[in-house]
Amino acid sequence: MTSVRCEWLWQAEALEDGRLDDEERVAFEQHAAVCPFCSAEVTQLAALRRIVRALPYPHVDDVALRRSRSQLLYGAHARLAERRQARRWRVPVGIAMFTAAAGAVVLLARGAHVPSPAAPSTAVIEQPKFDVSGTDGSTWAARASGGTARVRLSTGAVTVHVEHLGAGQRFLVDLPDGELEVRGTRFRVVVTDDHTSHVEVTEGRVALRLRGRGERLLGAGQSWQPAPSPSTAPVEQRDLGAPVRARASHAHAHVTTRKAEAARGDPAAVRSAPVAPALEPRAGVSPPAVAASPALAPQEEPGDLFAAAVHAFEARDYADADRLFVRFALARPRDARAEDALFLRAVARARVGDRQGAAALAREYLRRYPHGLRRLEAERFAGP
Amino acid sequence: MRPAIRSHDLSADSDLVARIANGDIASLGSLFDRYQADVRRLAARLGVPPADLDDLVQQTFLELLRAARRFDRSRPVRTWLLGIAVIMVRRHRRRLARWADRLAAWTRESASTSATTEADAIDTEVGVRRALRAIDRLSHKKREVFVMVTLENCSGPEAARSLGIPLATVWTRLHHARRELRRVLEDGAEGEHK
């Protein structure tokens, strides 16, 4: 900024803002042509605009964008359905399928936006025809928009039959940790504790896409479930009626294995984990690559873990807080609070005098969250 | 009976909003396709953490289901939508305020007790990081105006209407925001934390 005032100087900003009318603009531009101060002001304001407009901001890839769009439309549908309240939609019964283990219960999908078999065919793409049944206690909802039908499964088990899909038609099952797309088939999927725990295909083919993993195709007679061990055996073909024992690929087993092996304290399985070890009662434990805290106890919820960790932190029990934050991060690596958890681990290390540990965790924070909310403080911990 | 589903790609923005007001979810999807990037960019530049951006974009577009009925067709849809996004950001910020205060308090305690206390690394920051930090340090009110007008290319009157403030207030806040940013970028010094 110039420190010498020209009585016209304020008009430089007015020009930038578009506040000058044509006559004023012409007059000022004529003045600025011969006034070095106003000319410099105009140049600097334009430079500021260019600099800040060129600043980076987070982008999202096509897969995430497509998912975000689907979630939006699903949420919008749910909101509109709530408003209508009294309206009910019946899922079309083309071919009934009741193969759930606890006995099938056909649920009326309240608010499901699915047409009757006599729906008009004037749409560019007709909606798929399908049938869904869920076990007692399962939470799911079905809807259709255009040529795409979706079932959102939150927990429990559903059995789905989808009639052969035509061109442009799609049928997907939204899972807490991914999605499953079908091609006119019969299958069963189970979600437990926000994770897909079992998929079994009796007819046709499905494509299973779990977050952070590649697509997996399952054909008739095939099933999938996360492996309890680090075994890398592929999905197995098996006869229907036999107990499901298929083992996941290494890619699928990775995250689940990390949790399970952490429970047994297996260093090998945790070696590649991005989470540094929890504080031991003595200070000075260096990062990373040893066994982490045990996985969740059956009755524990990740949200409770985070609250317990914060409580321990506030009580200045930094070792306990660190262990709880590690367990929370293992249980919910993609939770929005994972950023805070990692930052607070660095603070906890600093509080107990572990400078190296605090710096390592702070650098990990900056690597994972380069535009994180606490990056300024993390930079102090990380040092030069 | 469901109405026929047709492509909305060629519809005017205001027509899409009118259909959304009538519960047309496909039109909501079309509007999302057109402006989700703008909303995401605005939210990011207003300081919403990356982990929360998805949720905030979702909330903004879901809010259209209610707000579409009151939309004035004489207004540009984009600016109206960005105004809704600003409201969502403010709500998000209030929700996080208490948590952020706690974190900040713990950090201050840590800075005073930790053996790793360092001189302010900001003194050595240049270029992009300094500019980002400078924008971060604007007050929320100045930042909203600066982002809407300078970064998102909204006119002063549009920004005033979307933010619910007088036009003169827009210019005043914009002036002060520019002054703070220029002080940081030209002199290499940090403005006062707001």
Image: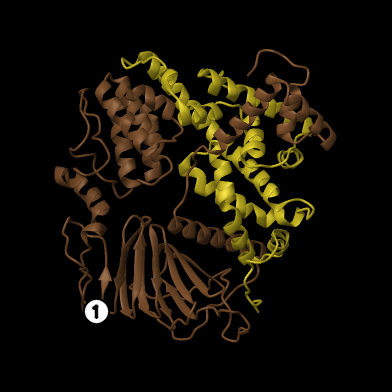
Question: Could you tell me which residue is drawn at 36 percent across and 14 percent down?
Answer: B113
The answer for which chain carries disc 1 is: A
Tag 1 secondary structure: loop
Left or right for A286, reference B169: left
Q: Give the residue pinned by disc 1.
A: A241
Question: Which image quarter: residue A50?
Answer: top right
Question: Could you tell me which residue is drawn at 79 percent across and 33 percent down?
Answer: A25
Image coords of residue B5 (percent x, y): 62, 75
Asked if one can make out residue A287 in the rendered structure from this viewpoint, the answer is: yes
Image coords of residue A115 (percent x, y): 58, 79
Question: Which image quarter: residue B115?
Answer: top left
Looking at the rendered image, the quarter that the C terminus of chain A falls into is: top left
**Which residue appears farthest toward the front when viewing the image?**
A34
Colour representing chain A: brown
Nearest the viewer among A103 and A149 is A149
Type of colouring: by chain
Looking at the rendered image, the quarter that the N terminus of chain A falls into is: top right
Image coords of residue A383 (percent x, y): 33, 22
Image coords of residue B26 (percent x, y): 61, 66
Question: Could you tell me which residue is drawn at 42 percent across and 68 percent down?
Answer: A136
Nearest the viewer among A35 and A195 is A35
Asked if one can make out residue B46 in the rendered structure from this viewpoint, the answer is: no
Nearest the viewer among A65 and A329 is A65
Left or right for B90, reference A236: right
Nearest the viewer among B37 and A253 is B37
Colour representing chain B: yellow
Amino acid type of the residue that numbered disc 1 sits on in the rendered structure: Gly
